């Protein structure tokens, strides 16, 4: 396969490498992901994360395994193992459905390689279109609030919600970005803060519990988030804490936008209640770990509830910004996402 580089994925000499998103921003470690077990481990540990990126990494690995001589049957099994690596983000399933189709071709090695590269290129273009459509909605002087990380680290391109913010900043419209730190794994504090710094976008980091008082003071003009899955009725699964932001935004009359590519749509899923929500380990809530070390503050035997995502009902969403443009609540009520 040709050499490939995104913010957090690399293919060099037919080998897949990932930028460890658990070590950023203090350390920039590129780790090999050259077999199914290794990539599944990286996905579980969120070293590879973000809905689009998970799907792209799995697709690239399958293509590389095929080039390295893995049989069609073994590739089919590897594909199913990868499909189960993260249950909520539907981009993984959507990408792997396309890879599964390529696997049925007579020259499946070439077909898988071409399809994986196509998915990467498409994701770049989808991000660009989302960013441009979304930045039109940003009014000059905006103070925007975002949650989790939806930037170049989480996609092959400029990102989704963070791509919108980046393009709006280029157009001189962003006064400040409030970055939710995003407990428990701190994707905002670690990754979004780093990306915005690299892009030169003015930001201030806040803990998740500070958004309410900022909105009450009139200091937030719009909320922009990404999505891991959009159901047919417009409900959205995204990083835990997104739903509370949407409730707050509604109460304070702040527009709440979801930015996502078409690979995040799941027309077969009727509503948010049908979206599987990944439950994660207690250790993520009883303490914190990263390149800085690990610390536990809760009692050893503390019982923990740790869902990785929550569901925001469509009724709280002002607009869904896709690569095809802005989808309004009226469009959604008229079945725009129902396939
Ligand atoms: O658990 P994560 O870090 O993979 O969660 C990521 C999110 O919730 C993002 O908002 C979503 O995947 C969209 S990334 C463009």
Image: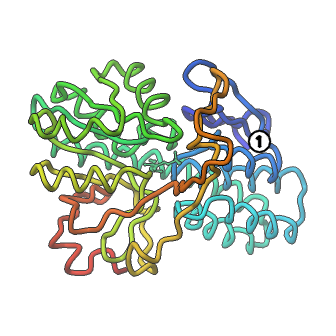
Which residue sits at x=15%, y=40%?
Answer: 215
In front of the other: 178 or 251: 251
Q: Is residue 149 above or below residue 104?
A: above
Q: Secondary structure at mark 1?
A: loop
The crowding category of the residue bearing disc 1, from other C-alpha atoms within 10 Å (few below 14, some 14 to 19, many at least 20), is many
Residue 35's spot in the image, x, y percent? 83, 49
- Give the labeled residue for mark 1: 33
Q: Is residue 111 above or below residue 336?
A: above
Residue 123's spot in the image, x, y percent? 48, 50
Which residue sits at x=50%, y=44%?
Answer: 155
Residue 179's spot in the image, x, y percent? 33, 32
What is the number of callouts on the image?
1
Q: Is residue 56 left or right of residue 327?
A: right
**Colour pattern:** rainbow
Q: Is residue 130 above or below residue 91?
A: above
In front of the other: 33 or 126: 33
- Quadrant placement of the C terminus: bottom left
Residue 279's spot in the image, x, y percent? 58, 59
Q: Is residue 125 left or right of residue 86?
A: left
Label 1 residue near ligand 1, CB within 8 Å: no
In front of the other: 109 or 316: 316
Q: Quadrant of residue 48?
A: top right
Which residue sits at x=21%, y=51%?
Answer: 248
- Quadrant placement of the N terminus: top right
């Amino acid at each position: 396969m040709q050499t490939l580089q995104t913010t957090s994925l690399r293919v060099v000499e037919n080998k897949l490498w990932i930028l460890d998103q658990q070590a950023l921003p203090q350390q920039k470690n590129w780790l090999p992901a050259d077999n199914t077990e290794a990539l599944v481990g990286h996905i579980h540990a969120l070293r590879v994360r973000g809905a689009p990126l998970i799907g792209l990494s799995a697709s690239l690995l399958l293509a590389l395994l095929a080039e390295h001589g893995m049989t069609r049957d073994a590739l089919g099994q590897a594909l199913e193992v990868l499909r189960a690596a993260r249950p909520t983000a539907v981009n993984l399933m959507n990408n792997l459905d396309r890879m599964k189709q390529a696997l049925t071709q007579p020259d499946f090695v070439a077909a898988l390689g071409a399809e994986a590269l196509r998915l990467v290129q498409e994701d770049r273009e989808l991000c660009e279109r989302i960013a441009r459509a979304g930045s039109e909605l940003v009014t000059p002087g905006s103070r925007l609030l975002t949650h989790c990380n939806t930037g170049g680290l989480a996609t092959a391109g400029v990102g989704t919600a963070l791509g919108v913010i980046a393009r709006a900043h280029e157009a001189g419209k962003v006064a400040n970005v409030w970055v939710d730190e995003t407990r428990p794994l701190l994707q905002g504090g670690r990754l979004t803060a780093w990306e915005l710094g690299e892009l030169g976008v003015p930001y201030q980091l806040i803990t998740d519990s500070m958004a309410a008082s900022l909105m009450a003071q009139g200091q937030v003009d719009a909320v922009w988030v990404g999505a891991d899955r959009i159901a047919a009725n417009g409900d959205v699964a995204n990083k835990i804490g997104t739903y509370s932001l949407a409730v707050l935004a509604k109460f304070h009359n702040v527009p709440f936008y979801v930015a996502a590519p078409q690979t995040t749509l799941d027309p077969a899923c009727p509503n948010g209640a049908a979206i599987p929500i990944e439950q994660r380990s207690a250790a993520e809530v009883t303490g914190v770990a990263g390149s800085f070390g690990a610390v536990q503050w809760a009692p050893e035997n503390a019982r923990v509830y740790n869902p990785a995502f929550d569901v925001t009902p469509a009724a709280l969403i002002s607009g869904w910004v896709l690569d095809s443009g802005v989808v309004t609540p009226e469009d959604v009520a008229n079945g725009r996402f129902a396939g």
